[in-house]
Image: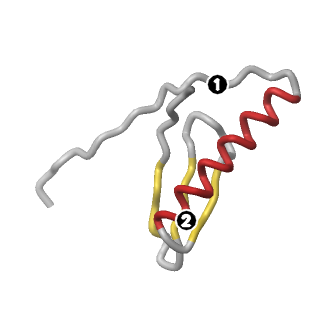
Amino acid sequence: MKEYYVVFEWTGRNYSAYVPDLPGCITTGSTPEETESNIKEAISLYIDTLKEDGMPVPEPTTTGRPVRVAA
């Protein structure tokens, strides 16, 4: 089991999500919950494809956290 950092964004029309450690692994959804479900599926398919092609599966290295600044 691996845990990848996922970035979720509101695009103004829907939500998008991407995985910095898995280039090109992106998805969209109409709600945060749908987007999370979609990115889980996208990650699984991405990793399955890498394995089928005999490619290494990248280790998770990206992390994140909120940072407060005066605005």
CA separation in Å, label 1 and label 2: 25 Å
**Position in image of residue 17 (x %, y %):** 54, 55
The mark nearer the N terminus, 1 or 2, is 2
Q: Residue at x 55, y 61 (%)?
A: 35
Q: Which residue is mark 2?
A: 34
Judged left or right of residue 12, residue 40 is: right
Total marks placed: 2
**Position in image of residue 22 (x %, y %):** 63, 37
- Mark 1 neighbour density, 10 Å: few (under 14) some (14–19) many (20 or more): few
- Mark 2 neighbour density, 10 Å: few (under 14) some (14–19) many (20 or more): few
Judged left or right of residue 17, residue 22 is: right
**Position in image of residue 24 (x %, y %):** 69, 46
Contact flag, marks 1 and 2 (Cβ < 8 Å)? no
Judged left or right of residue 38, residue 47 is: right
In the rendered image, the residue lying farthest to the front is 1
**Position in image of residue 13 (x %, y %):** 52, 79
Q: Secondary structure at mark 2?
A: helix
Q: Quadrant of the C terminus?
A: bottom left
Q: Secondary structure at mark 1?
A: loop
